[in-house]
Image (tube, rainbow, N blue to C red):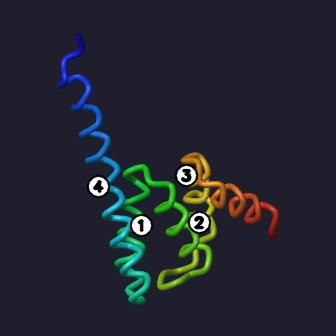
Amino acid sequence: MIKLSKVIAPIMVFGMVSSCYADVYQDGKTAYEQKRYFDAVSAYTKSCERGNPKGCLQVASMYENGEGIAQNKYLAASFYTQACRGGESLGCGNMSLMYDTP
C-alpha cells in the first residue's frame, strides 16, 4: 500500500512552485498594463529566474523593443533563448528572427 504522504507531498510541492512563479508573472503583467515598466521588467525577470518561460518571453520582448528600459538586443536574445529552452515556441521564433536580422 502506498503511503498517502508519498503521493500528496509531490503534488503539494508542484502546486506551490507553479503558483509561486505564476504570481510573480501576474505581477509583471499587471505592472506592464499599468505602464509601470520598471516593475514589469523586475517581475518578469524574477518569473524567468524561477523557471517560467512566459516571463522570459515578456522580458525579452521589453529588452528587444526598449519598452521602459534601455534597448538591449543581447539581453533580449538571451531571454528569448531561455524562453525557447523552456518550451515557449514564440521565444524560439523571436530568437531566430533576431539572429536573422542585421
Identified at 81% across, 70% down, the residue is 102
Q: Residue at x 33, y 72 (%)?
A: 27
Spatial distance from mark 3 to mark 1, Cα to Cα? 13 Å
Front: mark 1 or 2: 1
Which residue corresponds to mark 3? 82
Mark 3 element type? helix
Mark 1 lies on a secondary structure that is: helix
Q: Which of 7 and 83 is in front in this view?
A: 7
Q: Name the residue under label 1.
A: 44
Q: What residue is rendered at 43% in x and 81% in y?
A: 32
Please state the horizontal and vertical placement of residue 4, each as a whole percent of the image: 19, 23
Residue drawn at x 69%, y 64% as measured from the top left: 94
- Tell me the distance, in whole angstroms, between the alpha carbons under discs 1 and 2: 13 Å
Frontmost of labels 3 and 2 is 3
Residue lying at the far bottom in this picture: please name it.
35
Which residue type carries mark 3? Gln
Callouts 3 and 1 close, C-beta under 8 Å: no
If you read the primary sequence from the N terminus, does the residue marked by circle 4 or circle 2 appear first? Answer: 4
Q: Name the disc covering residue 20, or none.
A: 4
Check whether the beta carbons of the residues at disc 4 and disc 3 lie within 8 A of each other: no
| Dot 1 crowding, Cα within 10 Å, few <14, some 14–19, many 20+ | many
Q: What residue type is labelled 1?
A: Tyr
Residue type at tag 2:
Ala
Q: Could you tell me if the residues under marks 3 and 2 are in contact, i.e. CB atoms within 8 Å?
A: no
Q: Which mark, by number, is residue 76?
A: 2
Q: Looking at the image, is mark 3 or mark 1 earlier in the sequence?
A: 1
Q: Residue flagged by tag 4: what amino acid is it?
A: Cys
